Image (cartoon, rainbow, N blue to C red):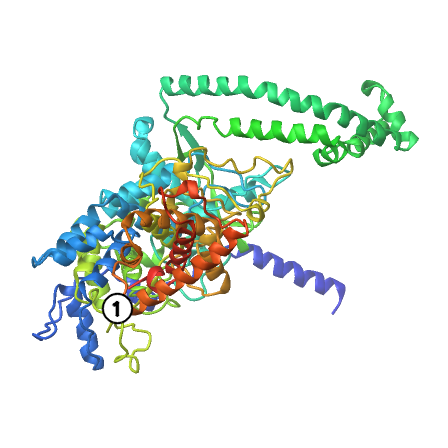
Amino acid sequence: MTRAVSFALLMSLAAGAAAQPKYADPELKPKDRAHWSFVPPKRPDVPAFRNPKLPIRNPIDAFVRAKLVEKGIAPSPAADKLTLLRRVTLDLTGLPPTPAQVDAFLKEDAVDAYEKVVERLLASPHFGERWATHWLDVVRFAETNGYEIDSERPHAWRYRDYVVNAFNSDMPYDQFVREQIAGDEIAGKDAKTKPELLIATGLHRCGPAHLVSGNLDSEVLRQEVLTEMVNGVGSTFLGLTFACTRCHDHKFDPLSAGDYYRLQAFFANAKYADVDFATQAERDARKKQADDLTAKTAPLKKQIADLDAPVRAKLGKEKREKLEPKYKEALDTPAEKRTAEQKTLAAQSNTLIKVSWDEVLAAMPPDDLAKRVKLREQLHALEAQLPPPTPAAWAIENTGSAKTFVLRRGETSQKTLEVQPGLPRVLVSGETPAPKTRRELADWLTKADHPLTARVIVNRLWQHHFGRGIVNTPNDFGARGEKPTHPELLDWLACELVEKKWSLKHIHRLIVMSATYRQVATGDHGAKLDGDNKLLWKMSRRRLEAEAIRDSVLTVAGTLNRQVGGRSVKVPLEPEVYDLIFTEGEPDGLWPVTPDARQHTRRSVYLFNKRNVRHPMLEAFDQPDTLNTCAVRPVSTFAPQALILMNSPFVHSQAKAFAISLLNEGDTDKQLNALYRRAVGRLPNATDRRLATEFLKDQAATVRARLKAKLPVGIEASSLPSGADVAHARALADLCVVLFNTHEFVYIP
């Protein structure tokens, strides 16, 4: 082939390529729309189930038992009252029942005794805290940006409180969705007088954000923000793996890259915004407090600077003396008279002679260093008292008029077709007029006949009550997701939610009132036919989540601070965990512990949630990393979990508080009764009592030997009731640690 022919061929191919559209959506076929999750749910008939030995408490039981009959599996008997009370209390509030609540329920003979308990729990402020934790997993909520700097988000906690309050007040789910998608647009010009609507849009800011200094491509960073918004909406509300379509048409679902970027176009002009809604009085009060603290910290900062200055000057002089002559000459030349080369040399030499904080500390005389350490401690103690920022909504707002393009391979440098806001094609059929705003997107998501919104949320509720969803891939209702075990029940629940004005508490009530939920969690009669208990022939035992384990420890120890809402709490960190905090400066004062120690025993949902540094106990028990949406937490079993529950300072401090409170119960038998009733809801049986008594005797003897040798035992006589035996108290605290480590304590029965 000649060069001329080759060139002509290449030009012809290039011209043909240029004539083709840069991007076109793949054709949708009828079979694509036929997938069950893309078809609007219709209320199915409740199966006619008649068996006097197997009572049907509500339609849930009819659907579940119809499947069991079909497979030839008998349901399990009902759980006893104590098991049921612990189960539903832990499930709905994440806290164990108190002995008084146990006594009241066991003595209650009324037919509706259990129903009264359920209503009490649904009305508890702790209900919202429990279920907000599940929601925050899905939206990957954290109070820092992630990445290397992991800077803090001072107003993020208000979104967490918004979610808690929404669940507690039983905000209709359609309203909950609309406010989070488009609260700012709903509020309109009255936004600052309706801060809750702005705070709700914090949903779009929950993911990590690459907000760091440096020479970064602003367009790439903006695309990262938009990606977080689109992926969040796709997984949270639609239960679809939209993230797969950022770079290419979906390999399995009828979702295209065009669908992805049309959805992104709804957010094209949405920018992060902290919208101040403080009153002038609040601003003035904060300024006065801040000014007062500044007046106290200024002298400390000066004393520290005075200690640093001579050392820094000496080190700088030594470094300068070691420079090559050309660098010295450049520095000695006045800036305005330097040649181009000298300007370069001067800039380089400034880097070479820069003195870092660690060099200053290493060269400082020991006495001055000790004085400096104390000054820094005083400084950080004062800085920890700095008043919080005045109220502002951690929100988004529309700014500008950006265009949206389908990006080949998700690269901002490879723009193809410009697109306008639009809905996923497989989920609509000739919607007119086409929606243009986030508010219209929210209205579409909450249509009564939407194929996914109601199904996705009732499936999430079911999952957390039974350990697995009707669809066991809660964030993937697509072709590669698992098929529903009870498709008719899923549709019935979705329709029921909509018909009952989107009340989530109504769905919770139906679930926990059902005979299916009330079954025992023991037995194996259905294991051969349904080893995973997908058909719910018994109740599945579930381990408490990390937060609920910590909260349960605080509850039974009697130290739980039940305050609801407010700023997040920073509890003391172990040194090895503190060392993980990134800094380019001095590594002190990086984690200002909340000064009020009473706040340290708040519920875990209120602990400050830092992306790159997590509480060891919560991390060990599978708290998600918040980098990605978490629909189902893994349940791992490995050695550090036992080590933390046996050895962590938190567990031991709570065990001591628990033991000290038990000393007021009377003799050892009464103490053991109170210990077991508070920890696991029941009296110790004969074996429990014998083993516990032997343990207390042997452990107390060991402690007495240490006391005799004048060795520390970890508990002070001054902290005990008058006349209490220190050795017995220490042994009792150790027994409390043992109870915290039992299967019965950390599992929902």
* Most foreground residue, 548 or 690: 690
Percent from the top left, x then y, of residue 93?
Answer: 27, 51
Percent from the top left, x then y, of residue 7?
Answer: 71, 61
Q: Which of the image's four quarters has the C terminus?
A: bottom left
Q: Is residue 191 visible?
A: yes
Percent from the top left, x then y, of residue 735?
Answer: 39, 58
To which quarter of the image does residue 459 belong? bottom left
Could you tell me which residue is drawn at 9 percent across and 75 percent down? 51
Q: Amino acid under label 1?
A: Met
Q: Is residue 499 visible?
A: no
**In the figure, is residue 424 to the left or right of 402?**
left
Q: Which of the image's four quarters has the N terminus?
A: bottom right
To which quarter of the image does residue 67 belong? bottom left
Percent from the top left, x then y, of residue 185?
Answer: 33, 35
Q: Which residue is mark 1?
A: 539
Could you tell me which residue is drawn at 80 percent across and 31 percent down? 353
- Judge the density around disc 1: few (<14), some (14-19), many (≥20) Cα neighbours within 10 Å: many
**In the figure, is residue 239 to the left or right of 458?**
right
* Most foreground residue, 422 or 15: 422
Could you tell me which residue is drawn at 52 percent across and 54 percent down? 706
* Most foreground residue, 20 or 616: 616
- Mark 1 falls on what kind of element? loop
* Most foreground residue, 2 or 743: 743
